[in-house]
Image: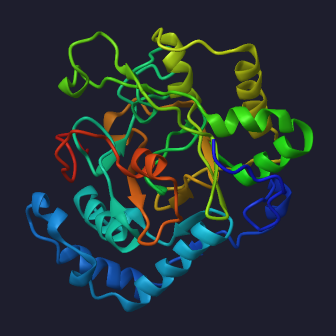
């Protein structure tokens, strides 16, 4: 276990829901000029999306857009840790064009990393009937179940709402720095557990051979901390499903103190005075720094028409100058799904 921060976080990263009452300064609305630059760059992508991977920031001429997104990234890294970018009218475009637009935004924001066994860099979030609640291997983005507070891969998870469900699907975010302050204030004895961390269950996907022939995935050989203080910067990250999955798969047994600590951190995240909740509207892009905030989604009921089902596009992104992390954490967070060939997307159907 490395250095433990014993002082509360006093920066704007440690926010509460009340800090954003009657405020919308966490929303950035793209201007018409910025959207025009985005459209031009999107139309300039090759016809074959397999070639988009070779498209880089040097291939994009969009000075106004880049300046706006740079300010957003600065806020993610050094400010509140989350942002909503709006201004895109999804009704003006078909889904193939929206994919192009979002791919350009991803290039402008950072480097995308694989999110699943297919190697997808840009994934469709839509209900395919998986049971996130009951299946240890299920992925939440393919389920309509409510998702617990968690963080994803990469520095930033980016969500682009194409269609929203008619019922449910509320998003919530909470500051890991505020949670840290609450632990320090009320249960500092848990800090050793959180800094020591836990092994994680590495899920199987569709019998993917990366994990061999076992019925279940494998347990990580390394404990990954929930909090880390490295080069004078506090970082946090949490995925209770994969932590608890290590025990369900028979590879780890929690102590009473560990179980109590995990219960406390989830109860703290769930406090209504700490979390900010909102509904994404079509065209909204939510950016969440995985080392600063946790996020969750409520259960939703989808439209019966397959062509009207809830659909978001997602990136896992590494920022150009991301905060320093201990090397083993860096590899875990920023490496993405291991042992796959990156592709823009799989053969998922986009209606």
Q: Is residue 324 above or below residue 152?
A: below
Please name the residue shown 32% across and 53% down the image. Answer: 113
Please name the residue shown 44% across and 15% down the image. Answer: 135
Residue 53 visible in the shown view: yes
Q: Is residue 287 above or below residue 216?
A: below
Kindly indicate the quadrant of the structure image that contains residue 27: bottom right
| Residue 29 or residue 140, whichever sits in front | 140
| Residue 172 or residue 257, whichever sits in front | 257
Residue 273 visible in the shown view: no
Question: In the image, 52: left or right of 65?
Answer: left
Please name the residue shown 22% across and 48% down the image. Answer: 345
Residue 142, image x and y in percent?
39, 31
Residue 85, image x and y in percent?
53, 68
| Residue 225 or residue 348, whichever sits in front | 225
Residue 282, image x and y in percent?
48, 56
Please name the residue shown 50% across and 19% down the image. Answer: 245
Question: In the image, 122: left or right of 229?
Answer: left
């Amino acid at each position: 276990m490395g250095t433990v921060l014993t002082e509360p976080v006093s920066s704007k990263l440690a926010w509460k829901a009340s800090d954003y009452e009657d405020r919308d300064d966490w929303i950035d609305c793209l201007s018409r000029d910025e959207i025009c630059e985005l459209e031009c760059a999107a139309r300039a992508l090759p016809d074959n999306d397999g070639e988009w991977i070779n498209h880089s920031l040097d291939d994009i001429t969009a000075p106004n857009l880049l300046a706006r997104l740079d300010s957003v990234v600065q806020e993610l890294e050094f400010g509140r840790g989350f942002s909503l970018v709006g201004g895109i009218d999804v009704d003006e475009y078909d889904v193939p064009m929206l994919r192009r637009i979002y791919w350009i935004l991803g290039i402008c924001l950072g480097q995308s990393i694989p999110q699943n066994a297919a190697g997808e860099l840009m994934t469709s979030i839509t209900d395919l009937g998986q049971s996130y609640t009951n299946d240890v291997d299920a992925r939440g983005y393919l389920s309509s179940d409510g998702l617990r507070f968690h963080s994803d891969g990469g520095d930033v998870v980016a969500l682009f709402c194409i269609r929203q469900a008619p019922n449910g699907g509320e998003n919530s975010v909470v500051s890991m720095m505020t949670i840290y302050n609450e632990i320090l204030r009320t249960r500092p004895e848990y800090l050793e557990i959180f800094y020591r961390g836990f092994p994680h269950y590495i899920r199987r996907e569709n019998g993917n051979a990366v994990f061999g022939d076992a019925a279940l995935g494998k347990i990580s050989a390394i404990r990954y901390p929930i909090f880390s203080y490295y080069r004078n910067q506090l970082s946090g990250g949490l995925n209770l499903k994969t932590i608890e999955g290590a025990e369900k798969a028979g590879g780890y047994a929690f102590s009473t103190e560990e179980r109590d600590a995990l219960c406390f951190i989830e109860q703290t995240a769930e406090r209504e005075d700490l979390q900010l909740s909102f509904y994404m509207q079509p065209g909204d892009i939510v950016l969440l720094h995985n080392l600063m905030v946790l996020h969750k989604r409520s259960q939703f009921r989808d439209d019966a028409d397959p062509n009207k089902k809830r659909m978001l596009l997602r990136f896992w992104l590494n920022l150009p100058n991301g905060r320093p992390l201990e090397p083993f954490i860096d590899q875990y967070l920023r490496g993405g799904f291991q042992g796959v060939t990156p592709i823009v997307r799989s053969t998922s159907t986009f209606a």
